[in-house]
Image (cartoon, rainbow, N blue to C red):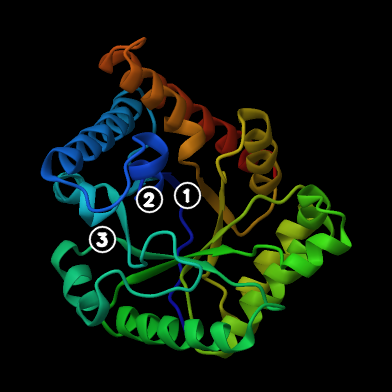
C-alpha cells in the first residue's frame, strides 16, 4: 500500500521537453549544446518566477516544482538545497505508450537527484489497446515497487485520451467526451492500475467540471484502505478561465490537495521574453503573479469546504 501524501501541494510543472524543443523554439532532431543551454535558460526563468512567488508570500511548505533532468538538473539540485518540494519525470517525452526515459538505468537517475516525487505521465484509456495497457501497467508496477521499496513518493499523471471511435460517436466534440465519458474512464483506469499493482501516492488528474466527478476520482484513488492517497488537478494548457473553474471545483472536494498548472502559468510570459517585447524580470514577475494566483484560488476554495 502507498503511504500517500495529504499536505497542500501547489506544483509549478515545467518538465516539458518535446513541447519546448518544437513548440517554444521550433527545433527538430538532435539538439546541439547551444540549443540545450537555451532551453535550460528558459526553464531558469520559470524557476526564478517560482522563487519570486515564495518571496512574495506563497507558503514554502506547500510549494513545489516539477522539472526534468535533461534541461533542469541544476534547478533540481538548487531546489533540493533550498528544501523545496521537487518532482522529476521518469517517462520518455511525447510517447503514446509509457516507457522509461533512461531505460534500465531509471533507478540510478532517480537516486542521483532524490526528488520528493518521481512522476510519470501516462496515457491510459481503459477502452484502448489492452495489450498496450498491460505493457504499460507492467512497467509502472516495476517503478511503483522500486519507489516504495526505496521509501520514495510516486506521482502519477493520468491522461485519458478519447479513442477515435468514441470521438466519432460524439461527432468530434472533445468537450462532450470530457464531460460524458472521461470521468468514468478515469475511475476505471485508476481501478485497473491499482489492481495491476501500481500504487501512486498522488494522482495528477485532468481537470473536471463537476464536483461529483472529482469526488468519484478521490473515492477511486482511496479505495481499499488507500486513505492517505490524494489527488491534484492539472491545467492541461487551458486558458485562465478554464483553469480557475477546475481549481475551484477540485478545491471544494476533500482529497484534492492542490494542483499542477504549468503552461497556463509560464507559456505566454516565456514567449514574450523569447521575442523580446518583455524583459526577463517582467517574465519572472508575470510567472510569479500567475502561480500565486493559483495558490490563492485553491487555498480559498479549500477554506470554504
Image spot of residue 32 (x, y percent): 15, 46
Tell which tag, 1 or 3, sits nearer the viewer: 3
Going by the image, does 183 lie left or right of 263? Answer: right
Depicted 272 relative to depicted 26: above or below: above
Confirm or deny contact between disc 2 and disc 3 (CB under 8 A). no
Q: Secondary structure at mark 3?
A: loop
Asked if residue 6 shows in the view, the reply is yes
Q: CA distance from mark 2 to mark 3?
A: 22 Å
Front residue of this view, candidates 37 and 213: 37
Depicted 17 relative to depicted 255: above or below: above
- Determine which residue is flagged by label 1: 8
Q: Secondary structure at mark 1?
A: loop
Mark 2 nearby-residue class (10 Å; few <14, some 14–19, many ≥20) = some
Mark 3 nearby-residue class (10 Å; few <14, some 14–19, many ≥20) = many
- Determine which residue is flagged by label 3: 115
Front residue of this view, candidates 182 and 102: 102
Amino acid at each position: 500500500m502507498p503511504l500517500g501524501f495529504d499536505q497542500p501541494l501547489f506544483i509549478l510543472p515545467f518538465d516539458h521537453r518535446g513541447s519546448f524543443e518544437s513548440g517554444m523554439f521550433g527545433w527538430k532532431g538532435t539538439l546541439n549544446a547551444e540549443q540545450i543551454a537555451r532551453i535550460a535558460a528558459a526553464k531558469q526563468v520559470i524557476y526564478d518566477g517560482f522563487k519570486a512567488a515564495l518571496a512574495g508570500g506563497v507558503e514554502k511548505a506547500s510549494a513545489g516544482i516539477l522539472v526534468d533532468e535533461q534541461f533542469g538538473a541544476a534547478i533540481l539540485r538548487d531546489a533540493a538545497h533550498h528544501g523545496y518540494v521537487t518532482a522529476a519525470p521518469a517517462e520518455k517525452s511525447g510517447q503514446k505508450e509509457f516507457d522509461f526515459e533512461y531505460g534500465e538505468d531509471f533507478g540510478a537517475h532517480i537516486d542521483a537527484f532524490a526528488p520528493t516525487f518521481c512522476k510519470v505521465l501516462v496515457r491510459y484509456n481503459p477502452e484502448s489497446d489492452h495489450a498496450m495497457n498491460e505493457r504499460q501497467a507492467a512497467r509502472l508496477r516495476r517503478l511503483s515497487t522500486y519507489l516504495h521499496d526505496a521509501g520514495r513518493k510516486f506521482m502519477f499523471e493520468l491522461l485519458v485520451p478519447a479513442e477515435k471511435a468514441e470521438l466519432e460517436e460524439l461527432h468530434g466534440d472533445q468537450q462532450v467526451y470530457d464531460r460524458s465519458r472521461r470521468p468514468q474512464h478515469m475511475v476505471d483506469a485508476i481501478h485497473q492500475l491499482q489492481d495491476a499493482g501500481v500504487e501512486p501516492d498522488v494522482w495528477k488528474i485532468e481537470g473536471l467540471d463537476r464536483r461529483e466527478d472529482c469526488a468519484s476520482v478521490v473515492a477511486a484513488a482511496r479505495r481499499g484502505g488507500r486513505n492517505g492517497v490524494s489527488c491534484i488537478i492539472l491545467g492541461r494548457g487551458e486558458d485562465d478561465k478554464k483553469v480557475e473553474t477546475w481549481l475551484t471545483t477540485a478545491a471544494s472536494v476533500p482529497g484534492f490537495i492542490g494542483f499542477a498548472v504549468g503552461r497556463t502559468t509560464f507559456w505566454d510570459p516565456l514567449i514574450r521574453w523569447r521575442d523580446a517585447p518583455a524583459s526577463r524580470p517582467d517574465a519572472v514577475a508575470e510567472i510569479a503573479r500567475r502561480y500565486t494566483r493559483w495558490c490563492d484560488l485553491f487555498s480559498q476554495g479549500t477554506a470554504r469546504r
